[in-house]
Amino acid sequence: MSSEFRKDLLSDKWVIILNDDNNFIPDKDSKFDYKSLPVLDANCPFCPGNENKTKFSIYELKKGNNWQVRVIPNNKPYLKVETNLKRHTKDIFAYIDGTGANEVIIETPIHNIDFDEMEVKDISFILQAYKERFLDLKKDERMEHIIIIKSRGIKAGSFIPHLHSQLVAFPVIPPMIDEELNEAENYYKIKNNCVYCDMIKSEIKLDERVILSNEHFICILPYASRVSFEMMILPREHKSHFYDINEKEVMSLASILKEAIYKLNKATGYSAYNMILHTSPIKLSKLEYYHWHIEILPKLKNFSGFEQATGLFINPTTPEEAANYLKELK
C-alpha cells in the first residue's frame, strides 16, 4: 500500500490519498435503503396529507393540483428570521442574536425516492425552488450568506428519510466559505484567472477524474478528494452566484444530478451522503475569482482519531480509481 499527500487548490488543505489494494469497507450503518420504505408514510410529516404536522408553507411549486416541492420553516430552527439583529458585548466577549432563516425544502411528495429514480423535470422543480428562495431571502439586508444542505440517511445527519434539504441564511459568512473565497482570491491575484475555471480546463484535458459532463455542467472527483467517491459539480461557464442559473442550465443540472446520484448509489450500495451548495455571499456583486458549485460527500466511515487530531483527511481510494469505476456504471 502506497500513499501521497495532495493539496486541495480550493481550500489550502492537505489530504492523504492511499492506494490500498483492499480498497475500503464501508461501515454497516452508512447504508440507507430508501427502496424498502413505502411510497407514502402516514407518520411522515413531509408526506402529502400530513401538511397539518408541519408549519405553513413558505413556498410551493405545484404539479397539476398537488404540490411537487414544498418549503416550510424548520420546526427547530438554528436561526430565526423574526429575531432582530443586534450585537452584544460582555467584557472582552461579544455575540450577536441568532438572526437568520432556517427552512426545510420538501423535495418530492414521494416518500421512498432519491434523485436517481426521479424524472429530470421533477429535479428541476427542486432547483427552481432553491433559486426562488435565494432571490427572496437576498432582499433581507440582514443576511450575508445562504447555504443549502441535503443530508441523506442517519449517518449524514437526517432522521427523516423523506427526501428533503435545509436552507440556512446567515448574518455572517461561514468560515468554510470565507476560506474558499480567500483561496480563490489569492489564486486570482497570482494567475489573473478563476481557480475553478482553470481546474475545469485541467480536468477536461487530463480526463482522469471527469465522470459526467453535458453542455452546461461537469462532474468530477476532486484531485484531493476527502472521502472515497466524493463528487463536485461545477458550471462550465463562470458564474459566482447560484441564483443566476437560467432555465436551460436548471434542466442540465437536474440531468447531471440524477446521473451522479445514480452512480453514487450503485457504487456505494446506497450509502448516506451530504450534498452541499456553495455559492458567493449574496451581498457581493459578481466575483471574477469565485465559482459556485455543488459538493457531494458520501458518509462511508467515521473520522478517525488521526483525522480529528491533525485535520488531515485519509482517503483509502484514489479519485482516479474511483472515477474509472464510476464511468463504467451506466
Image (cartoon, rainbow, N blue to C red):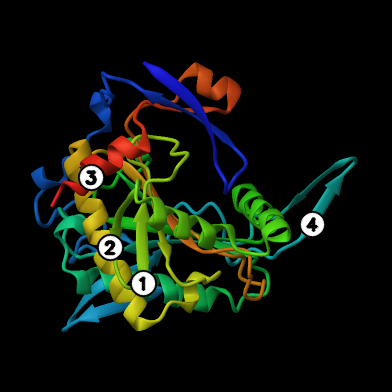
Indicate left or right for 188 with 315 as reference: right
Q: Inspect the image, locate mark 3, and give the three-letter code of the amino acid beneath it.
A: Leu
First in residue order: circle 4 vs circle 2: 4
Query: Can you give x and y, in whole percent of width and height, for residue 273 in the image?
Result: 33, 43
Foreground residue among 264 and 215: 215
Q: Inspect the image, locate mark 4, and give the three-letter code of the amino acid beneath it.
A: Arg
Give the crowd class for mark 4: few <14, some 14-19, many >=20 residues within 10 Å.
Answer: few
Q: In front of the other: label 4 or label 3? A: 3
Tally of numbered discs: 4
First in residue order: circle 1 vs circle 4: 4
Indicate left or right for 39 with 24 as reference: left
Instruction: Name the residue: 42% across, 67% down.
Output: 235
Q: Which residue is mark 3?
A: 326
Q: CA distance from mark 1 to mark 2?
A: 10 Å
- Whether tag 3 and tag 1 are in contact, CB under 8 A, the answer is no
First in residue order: circle 3 vs circle 1: 1
Q: Which residue is mark 4?
A: 87
Foreground residue among 45 and 129: 129
Mark on residue 256? 2
Q: Which residue is mark 1?
A: 216
Q: CA distance from mark 3 to mark 2?
A: 14 Å
Indicate left or right for 259 with 190 as reference: left
Q: In front of the other: label 4 or label 2? A: 2
Q: CA distance from mark 4 to mark 2?
A: 43 Å
Q: In front of the other: label 3 or label 2? A: 3
Q: CA distance from mark 1 to mark 4?
A: 43 Å
Instruction: Name the residue: 38% across, 66% down.
Output: 72
Secondary-structure class at tag 4: strand
- Whether tag 1 and tag 4 are in contact, CB under 8 A, the answer is no
First in residue order: circle 3 vs circle 2: 2
Query: Can you give x and y, in whole percent of width and height, for residue 15 in the image?
Result: 51, 31
Q: In front of the other: label 1 or label 2? A: 1
